Amino acid sequence: MLQEVSQERSSGLIYNLPSRSEVHRGKSTKVKWKIKYPFIRLLVFLFVGLIVLLPLYFL
């Protein structure tokens, strides 16, 4: 195992990696679902809950 790592280093496989800034340059940010108003959040929660629970009720 140690011999494989030393062979990779001597052949230059490890050193051909891009820099960290290049790797993370195109990274997209996570989409945040932030709803300011609690009443709207409650309505959305109830609406999604109805969509999930109504088909289960009629089975």
Image: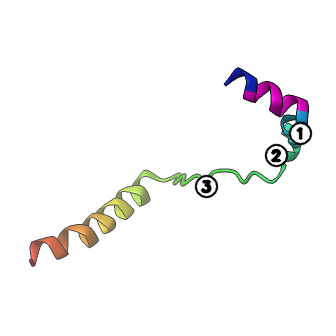
Residues at marks 1 and 3 touching, judged by CB atoms closer than 8 Å: no
Question: As displayed, is residue 8 above or below residue 44?
Answer: above
Return the residue nearer the eye: 3 or 24.
3
Q: Is residue 26 left or right of residue 52?
A: right
When the figure is inspected, residue 5 is found, relative to residue 56, above or below; the finding is above
Which of discs 3 and 2 lies nearer the camera? The answer is 2
Q: Which residues are magenta?
A: 4-10
On the image, the x and y values in percent for residue 20 come to 84, 38
Query: What is the crowding at mark 2: few (fewer than 14 residues within 10 Å), some, or many (at least 20)?
Result: few
Q: Earlier in the sequence, mark 3 or mark 2?
A: 2
15 vs 2, nearest the viewer: 2
Q: Check disc 1 and give the amino acid type.
A: Ser
Residue at 84 percent of width and 48 percent of height = 25
Instruction: Report which quarter residue 45 is drawn in.
Output: bottom left
| Residue bearing the label numbered 2 | 23
Question: At which x and y percent is residue 37?
Answer: 48, 53
For marks 1 and 3, give the CA distance: 26 Å
Q: Which residue is mark 1?
A: 19
